[in-house]
Image (spheres, grey):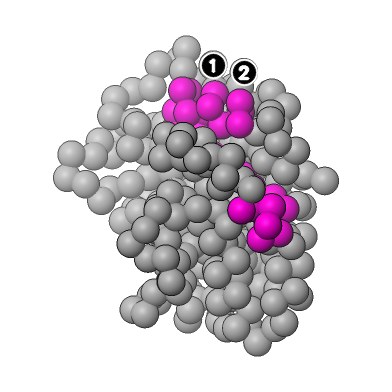
Amino acid sequence: MFVDVHCHLSFPDFDNDRQEVIGRLKEQNISLLIDPGTDTRTSKRSIELSSLHDFIYSTVGLHPHDVTKAVPEETLSELESLAALPKVVGIGEIGLDYHYRDHCATSQLEAFRAMLRLAKKLDLPAVIHSRDAWKDTLRIIREEKSSNLRGIMHCFSGNTEIALECIRLGFKLSIPGILTYKKSTLPAVVHDIEIGDLLTETDAPYLSPVPFRGKRNEPSHVRFVTEKIAEIKQLPLNAAAGIIKRTALELFAVA
């Protein structure tokens, strides 16, 4: 019933109890999980995990935190080779992050363009991270726009105006556990956006929803995000979960 389109289950945070976490996934009816890579090493770990479970898929890419200088051609070539492997359904986690003072905007912008072009070349959806960088994120997407450029705005943090622009450019909004926080502005966005343009994620091990805030997040908690969306949209839980799942299956082209 439920889907988590962005969860770092392959990260070391789950090394001690990954099988137990996967067991809870099945108990909570999580039928699709997408585990993103953030560089070549983590992309390989993600692919390895997805190869072991029929309902887990992976994406490969370069996270902006891992881009501090020009990306070598061999890295781009290796990511392209990894993206051709079975169970890889997207290019990501990619994007821009200007939150920290020591970020290198020039290198991030170059890497972001390269990753978007790879997504277009391979006809795969892009999984985009944007933090304190919406102006440049949307500008680059507009400049790289093509008929097959599509994907998700992972851990969406913008307002309704930004949300509508993302949708216009071919992207769905992936909603994290922040939706359940008391001071979150996401409920207003979810209210204003068609449910067919929304997806659910945990970004585990980060951003645990209420009532687990402050603890390690895990993919089974995506149910709480889905419940909150259903409440805001005034839909039965099964109906909301069904729409979100169909959107995810279509976007990532998985059965």
Q: State the extent of the magenta-drawn residues as a range.
A: 24-49
Q: Do the residues labelled 1 and 2 touch (CB within 8 Å)?
A: yes
The image quarter containing residue 146 is top right
Give the residue at mark 1: 77
Question: Eyeballing the image, is 143 above or below 79?
Answer: below
| Residue ranking furthest to the bottom | 234
Question: Eyeballing the image, is 15 above or below 224?
Answer: above
In the image, residue 33 lies in the stretch drawn in magenta: yes
Q: Residues within 10 Å of mark 1 (few under 14, many from 20)?
A: few
Dot 2: element = helix
- Mark 1 to mark 2: distance in Å? 6 Å
Along the line of sight, which residue is nearer the eye, 221 or 162? 221
**In screen coordinates, is 76 left or right of 134?**
right
Residue 114 visible in the picture: no
Please give the name of the residue rendered at 57% of the width and 83% of the height, measured from the top-left corner: 232
Q: What residue type is labelled 2?
A: Ser
Please give the name of the residue rendered at 51% of the width and 67% of the height, measured from the top-left corner: 163
Give the residue at mark 2: 81
Q: Which amino acid does label 1 sit on?
A: Ser
Along the line of sight, which residue is nearer the eye, 213 or 120? 213
Percent from the top left, x then y, of residue 132?
A: 31, 56
Along the line of sight, which residue is nearer the eye, 205 or 69? 205
In the image, residue 157 lies in the stretch drawn in magenta: no
Question: Eyeballing the image, is 229 above or below 128?
Answer: below
Specify the quadrant that holds the N terminus.
bottom right
